[in-house]
Amino acid sequence: MAHDVTGISAKEALLKLKKGNETYLNAASNPGDISPDIRKDTCENGQFPYAVVVTCSDSRVIPESIFSAGIGELFTIRVAGNVINDFQLGSVEYAADHLGSKLIVVLGHTHCGAVGAAMSGHTGGFIKAITDEIKAAIGDETDEYKACCLNIENSIRRISDNLHIPAEGTEDGVKVIGAVYHIDDGHVEFME
């Protein structure tokens, strides 16, 4: 049976994420439902993700594992450096408007290669489009953690401004927040 979260508030979704991360901290495997039954149910009845997670493509950052989520629970958007452009905005808008997700989380992480590359200025090719966006967000910041947070805040602003979501949330309860995943120990620090 699909995890129907129609009507779940941003506050309730945040509590689910926090509880899921607590479970993850001591888990050896993902307890989220990935069973044949949930695959069949979500195929037949659709998806109802309780949160949108915009995060980095880094292979160490797996939102479904980090939040102990199963199939159909998170609408995950991944791009190096968790930067936001029209493709990510369209995906966020789809999840909020058509799937009913009330919470949008921009999840950055420690030891991010894209943030590090933006700080060092040693990039070229297509990667430069990503690092230029991050560099504009972080300015001359030299502390990796602070740069990560500035980059997250920039992505939050881009989502909020373009999708008209005020800092306190919208009338229908959609809220955008930031979070930092700490690769070394697995905990998620929410920027509330």
Image: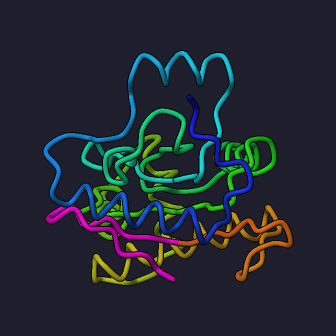
How many numbered marks does the figure carry? 0
* In front of the other: 156 or 81: 156
Q: Is residue 191 magenta?
A: yes
Task: Residue 88 in the image: state x and y as whole percent.
Answer: 64, 47
Q: How is the image coloured?
A: rainbow
Residue placed at 30% from the left, 78% from the top? 145
Relative to 43, 126 lies left or right: left
Task: Residue 173 in the image: state x and y as whole percent.
Answer: 76, 68
- Of the 4 image quadrants, the one containing the N terminus is top right
The stretch of residues the image draws in magenta is 178-192
**Please, which residue is most extreme toward the right here?**
171
Residue placed at 35% from the left, 82% from the top? 146
Residue placed at 81% from the left, 48% from the top? 97
Q: Is residue 24 magenta?
A: no
Residue placed at 75% from the left, 43% from the top? 94
Relative to 187, 171 lies left or right: right
Task: Residue 117 in the image: state x and y as whole percent.
Answer: 31, 60
Q: Is residue 79 above or below residue 116?
A: above
In terms of image quadrants, where is residue 125? top left
Task: Residue 66 in the image: state x and y as whole percent.
Answer: 32, 53
* In front of the other: 25 or 131: 25
* In front of the other: 27 or 163: 27
In terms of image quadrants, where is residue 147? bottom left
Q: Is residue 125 above or below residue 185?
A: above
